[in-house]
Image (cartoon, rainbow, N blue to C red):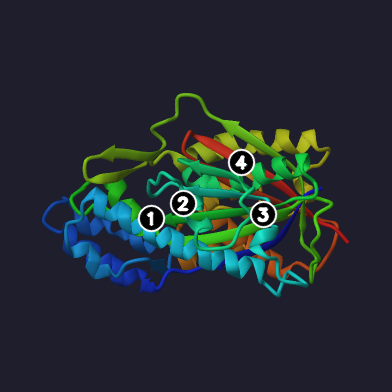
Amino acid sequence: MPKIVSVSTYQPPYTLHQQEIEQFTKTIFQNNIPQLNRLLKVFENGEIEKRHFCVPLEWHKEEHTFEERNQLYIQLAVDYSVKAIQKCLQNEMYLKRPISTEEIDAIFFVSSTGISTPSIDARIMNQLTFSDRIKRLPIWGLGCVGGASGISRAYDYCLAHPKEKVLVVCVELCSLTFQRNDFSKSNLVGASLFADGVACALVCGDEANVENQKMVPSIIRTASKWMPDSEDVMGWDIKNDGLHVIFSKSIPTIISKWLGPFIESFFEEVGLSIKDLEHFIAHPGGKKVLLAYKEALNLSDQHIKLSRKVLQENGNMSSPTVLYVLDEYMKRIKKGDSYGLLVALGPGFSGESVLLQWRE
């Protein structure tokens, strides 16, 4: 089975505590949103402690055009991706030897917070030395589910090409999409929750020339699920001034009713039970989302502990977030023959599940 051989994360340079962001948001919105003080409780109730951003808080005091935001997205997405790729391919925690970018056979670039043609992966390839025969697959618009979907598509690729090595690069600069003149509740919730982050994973086929320092997860199987007529659950409303967040309050309820049957049927397909699951590697969309996972799958607090840790320390970074959680698990797991499930949900409305096994 293909394996996730290495993973890395990169934190943008501006770290802010939740109280600072709450106070700034109050200043921006105080004359425009009725009962603002009551609504600001979402900052405390979400249990996020700090987040990381690509721009300082003061940047949001000024108006910025969609063009200005997007140019900054392109510049920083390339810069941060290069750093994450280098860190992933030279990660001594996982790899016995560094992997050269020239050894990479395919790159899957995942993002939803900016627009670029040529896509960001092409721009990255002009910063690092990749083969001119590399295959490229830019994936746009999957939002929070993008990290899990990127891993699934890399798995599909490695099944067909067992000697090859694939990079999955996820970049989201959510702070550049913040709309200071959008007084909707969705925008306020987004301001309390979203952050910037970057992650990179190296997925390799069975016959790829790579050696690991420690046990890493094999990908057993993946599953996707889509909910019809659910475009308004989450996503972007694209307007002249940029991307406006769509964020339905029904998301936790949807997860509670929809996720359980999806995962149960997936486990039946592979001949397992949810009781066999030791590690739950969930995209922490928010506190309520984690509790909905727990309820839907009858999980313990221990199952969501590391997802909660990532949420507390980083907020919701959209697509890279689940790879931050994966990195936390890969650093810790020492016992073989244990199963893990990597799960994320996103616009569409859709879900992606990746069954992993740490094998002796």
Q: In the drawing, does residue 106 fall left or right of residue 244? A: right
Residue at 47% over, 45% down: 143
Q: Quadrant of residue 174?
A: bottom left
Specify whether 135 is left or right of 28.
Answer: right
Check disc 2 and give the amino acid type. Ile
Residue 107 relative to residue 66: left or right: right
Residue 19 in view in this figure: yes
Q: Amino acid at mark 1?
A: Ile
Q: CA distance from mark 1 to mark 2?
A: 7 Å
Q: Is residue 300 visible?
A: no
Given contact means CB atoms under 8 Å apart, are the residues at marks 3 and 2 in contact? no
* Residue on which disc 3 sits: 280
What is the quadrant of the C terminus in the image?
Answer: bottom right
Residue type at the position of mark 4: Glu
**Who comes first in sequence, dot 4 or dot 3?**
3
Residue 261 position in % (x across, y down): 65, 33
Q: Which residue is mark 4?
A: 352
Residue at numbered disc 1: 74
Secondary structure beneath disc 3?
strand
